Amino acid sequence: MSDTPFHETLDLSLCGQLGRVHRICRQAISVAVEPLGFTQPRWTAMMYIQHLGEGCTQHELATNLGLEMPSLTRTLKQLEQSEIIERRVDSQDKRCRRLYFTEQGHQQMLLLRARIAEIKTQLYRNLSDEQLNGLAQGLIQLEENALNLIQEDQL
Amino acid sequence: MSDTPFHETLDLSLCGQLGRVHRICRQAISVAVEPLGFTQPRWTAMMYIQHLGEGCTQHELATNLGLEMPSLTRTLKQLEQSEIIERRVDSQDKRCRRLYFTEQGHQQMLLLRARIAEIKTQLYRNLSDEQLNGLAQGLIQLEENALNLIQEDQL
DNA sequence: TTAAAATATTTAGCATGCTAACTAATTTGG
DNA sequence: CCAAATTAGTTAGCATGCTAAATATTTTAA
């Protein structure tokens, strides 16, 4: 071990920590949701479709998930093949596909939400509302700074 | 938009936020470090090798980066091919490869550290030390909970 | 009104994480 | 002392993010 203080050597440890915690959280949730047969991108998309309301477009969903369209396309194709969702072409604007749960999809959502409620209590255990809020706020500020940095660099 | 409150529908938004912020931060840093020719896994590994001290093993490095060995192997192979590092077999334990910078690698590190110092001030702008600390602490707790969850589920 | 720009989606292929299964070397226990 | 377990590392191949480029449709503007 070097005797240089960690923060001086590393400088960007927070970003690495972010990635590590994200990977571990994702894995924890995956393990818990796996028995239902959903991967993280799939169940996340399902939750967001329900949140946005059935009939949302793929573009709306991608924006809300913070994903690029191609990343989402793959996941939606899987959900369609599993007969969880349907993609219907909008009658007004034929470029858009609007998203709906199948009957089976609705039933799966009930199971999924119940399972996720359980996980949530365990994942946020020992974290006060205040702490969770601080965490979320800090992340928002970090995100904003990063976005600014990217834009500046692209000038 | 549904009229259901966000947190009730989503329940795990924090985990999604974590992923999103991580992707954006990573992109910001990549954009800034790109002119030097380093990708995020490469410069992160370089910084950690310097932090751990030259002569560290790949296993030590993987543990500190929070990565699995195969993920690291790929990156180290690239760094070796770019003649940034050397991997020398340990004379005592011939299973271990120990990591050293080349002369060129040392010079690159000087540039890299200077660049990263600049980025850091911008990325952490508007975040008080207290906030940064809260963020880091919250992430640690989250990580711990997630690890517990995974272990419980594997019983 | 029609050519050009914009928008929604897809496809193809890269980057970087992972697990599973392998080799080689070392350590341990009977 | 040797067979079995452990440890360090690799290879192969999957998962899920991305960008670039293609298609189809709609909107804008000369």
Image (tube, coloured by chain):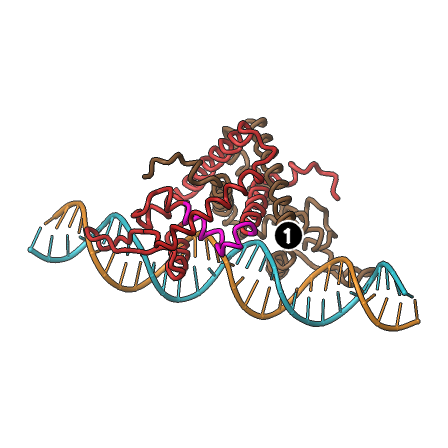
Chain colours: A red, B brown, C cyan, D orange
Q: Residue at x 64, y 52 (%)?
A: B154
Main SS of the magenta part reads helix
Q: Chain of mark 1?
A: B
x then y, percent, for residue D26:
19, 51
Q: Nearer the viewer, residue B115 or B148?
A: B148
Classify residue A133 as left or right of residue A108: right
Image: A29 above or below D2: above
Q: Residue B135 in the image: x percent, y percent?
A: 57, 33
From what the image shows, is residue B81 above or below residue A91? Answer: below
Residue C28 sits in quarter: bottom right
Side of D2 where D24 appears, left or right: left
Q: Position of residue A96 (x, y in %)?
A: 26, 52
Whether the magenta-drawn stretch holds residue A45 is answered as: yes
Q: Is residue B59 left or right of residue A21?
A: right
Name the quadrant of the N terminus of chain B: top left
> Which residue type carries mark 1?
Gln
Reading the image, the residue beneath label 1 is: B154
Dividing the picture into quarters, in which one does residue A151 lie? top left
Residue B126: percent from the left, percent from the top? 50, 28
**Residue A113 magenta-highlighted:** no
Query: Does the image show residue B83?
Result: no
Residue range of the region highlighted in magenta in the rendering: A31-47
Relative to A132, is C14 above or below?
A: below
Q: Neighbour class for label 1 at 10 Å: few (<14), some, many (≥20)?
A: few
Q: How many numbered discs sit on the rendered protein? A: 1
Q: Regarding mark 1 in the picture, which secondary structure is present there? A: loop
